[in-house]
Image (cartoon, helix red, strand yellow):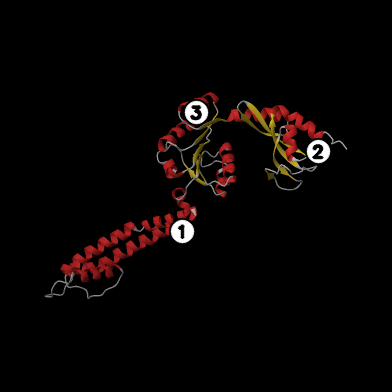
Amino acid sequence: MTRVRAECLFYLRALRSLARPFGLLVLIAIDGAVLYHYFGQAEGAPLPAWDHSFFVSYTLLFLEHVEPVPVHPVGQLLYYVWPLFGIVLLTEGVINLGITVFNKESDAKGWVTLMARASRGHVILCGLGNVGYRVLDELQGMGLSVFAIERDENSKFLESARKTDCQVLIGDPRTPGTLESLNIAQARAVIIATDDDLANLEIAMDVREARKNIPIVMRMFDQALAQKVRSTLGIEVSVSTSKLAAPLLACAALDPSIVGTHDVGGTKLVVMQIRVLPGFAGVKVVTIAQEQDGTVLAVRPEGGEWSLQPSPQQVLAAGEEVQIMVGSHGVEQIHEANRRAQPS
């Protein structure tokens, strides 16, 4: 539906490219009517009516002669010059319309702007570097519409982003009017993921000025600065990438089965991905929760697809993969229970 609305806006804009030649055509037709009214009549004949004068001027612009050539030199000039005006203005209109309609790629910025104007609930992503591109991938995996702004027209991720449904605008988010051109008034959120803390902070302030209540997620390297920004500038989430990455790197170094971490009120939760061994084979999902304090998030049979939120009564089979969320203190307990053979 967004593309349909954008296409309608695009063709309306294409029609507006005819405004100048059409306006000049009308103006010249009126001037011609005035000239014909006073200088187009035969000698001794009364002045022609205004409606007839306009009709003659209009037809001359389209290379038609509905009346004989006037006797007066001014009237004769009208007959020879007005068709040239018509040819020039009609040619300009056709060229303008053709360039606009058939050469969308020459105005990529205009097309992205039109798509944004037609969008509602989209996410604006500032920065398409290593982090930004992966954020884009996650957002699109959630089914969200994303409009990205990237300063570097040679970014290695541009082509990959454009091959998806992402609309990419080359420019600086700090340039006045850039955020507005992506319809920030109707956007769902803004994610700022460039590799420059000060630039990110400036963009965040511009976003807040453009729209007071929009959620902002900002990437920051300086953890102390991130905390101050969060508490003083009213930005809902200010994320230090080092703070996010450090727990996962530390846990993964100790146990390769850990694929994610989460902190709840100071309690460290981890997500483990393990293969079902004899200890968990034949065990129900609910049993792991009761005996190991672990929550089974997903199950994948050998060669199959992940099944999210499995039923508590589902029985695990040897060789399946499972993702289990558990407190960091319970990681080794999960491994031991999985390795332990069931009593016969």
Mark 2 or 1, nearer chain start = 1
Q: Residue at x 70, y 30 (%)?
A: 252
Pick the quarter of the image with the C terminus: top right
Residue extending farthest top = 224
The residue labelled by disc 1 is 102
> Could you say where residue 258 lies in the image, as x and y percent from the top left?
70, 33
Mark 2 or 3, nearer chain start = 3
The residue labelled by disc 3 is 230
> Could you say where residue 276 lies in the image, as x and y percent from the top left?
78, 39
Amino acid marked by disc 2: Leu
Give the Cα distance between marks 2 and 3: 45 Å
> Could you say where residue 300 lies in the image, as x and y percent from the top left?
73, 44
Tell which of 39 and 175 is nearer to you. 175
Give the Cα distance between marks 2 and 1: 61 Å
- For residue 93, which quarter of the picture? bottom left
- Establish if 23 lies above or below 159: below
Tag shown at residue 277? 2
Mark 3 or 1, nearer chain start = 1
Amino acid marked by disc 1: Phe
Q: Residue at x 28, y 70 (%)?
A: 59
